[in-house]
Amino acid sequence: MLRVEVTDDLDSCFALRRKVFMEEQGVTEAEEFDGKDATAIHVLAHKGDSPAGCARVLPFGTTARIGRVCVLPEYRGKAVGIALIETCHDAARATGATRVILGAQTRALSFYERLGYASYGDVFDDAGIAHLMMERGL
């Protein structure tokens, strides 16, 4: 059973991010932990008793930025990412946001497009990985 909710369990979120971003994708610790976690809303997905993925929401005015979206390899393709993003949308709405933005890895563009996101701007490098900004209304 999949459970996704806003959480204060930063240890689980950070462990997931270390595994996916640092170990799997080669992001450095300094790049991954940017000092913004203290002001973020964190979302954690559990499949049964096991943490499966996480994300964070940084609200500012009527916009919120979703980031650090990750799902463990064994849970990819099983709607965990969709549930994470939908929960992030709910958390953003609760802050008064009417729009969400995110920097998507270019290999994940179609995933976000299926969720109603549109890209804008130019491709940029973040931690050695090509990204593109995306947005959608809430």
Image (cartoon, rainbow, N blue to C red):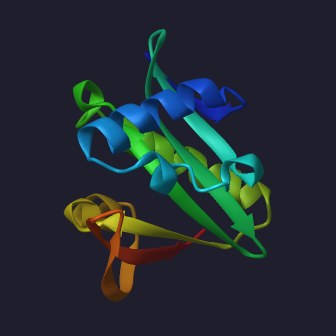
Q: Let me know if residue 54 appears in the view.
A: yes
Q: From the viewer's perspective, is 76 left or right of 56?
A: left
Which quadrant would residue 43 be assigned to in this image?
Answer: top right
Q: How many marks?
A: 0
Q: Locate residue 64, reporting x and y percent.
A: 65, 67
Q: From the viewer's perspective, is 57 left or right of 28?
A: right
Residue that appears at 43% across and 15% down: 1
Residue that appears at 28% across and 47% down: 26
Q: From the viewer's perspective, is 36 left or right of 123?
A: right
Q: Is residue 76 shown above or below 27?
A: above
Residue that appears at 72% across and 30% down: 8
Q: Quadrant of the C terminus?
A: bottom right
Q: Nearer the viewer, residue 121 or 36?
A: 36
Which quadrant would residue 16 be assigned to in this image?
Answer: top left
Q: Nearer the viewer, residue 39 or 134?
A: 39
Q: From the viewer's perspective, is 45 left or right of 35?
A: left
Q: Nearer the viewer, residue 39 or 101?
A: 39
Q: Locate residue 82, reporting x and y percent.
A: 40, 45
Q: Locate residue 57, reporting x and y percent.
A: 63, 55
Q: Locate residue 115, reporting x and y percent.
A: 38, 61
Residue that appears at 79% across and 59% down: 95
Q: Residue furthest top?
A: 49
Q: Nearer the viewer, residue 91 or 42?
A: 42
Q: Is residue 87 shown above or below 123?
A: above
Which quadrant would residue 126 be assigned to in this image?
Answer: bottom left
Q: Let me know if residue 2 appears in the view.
A: no
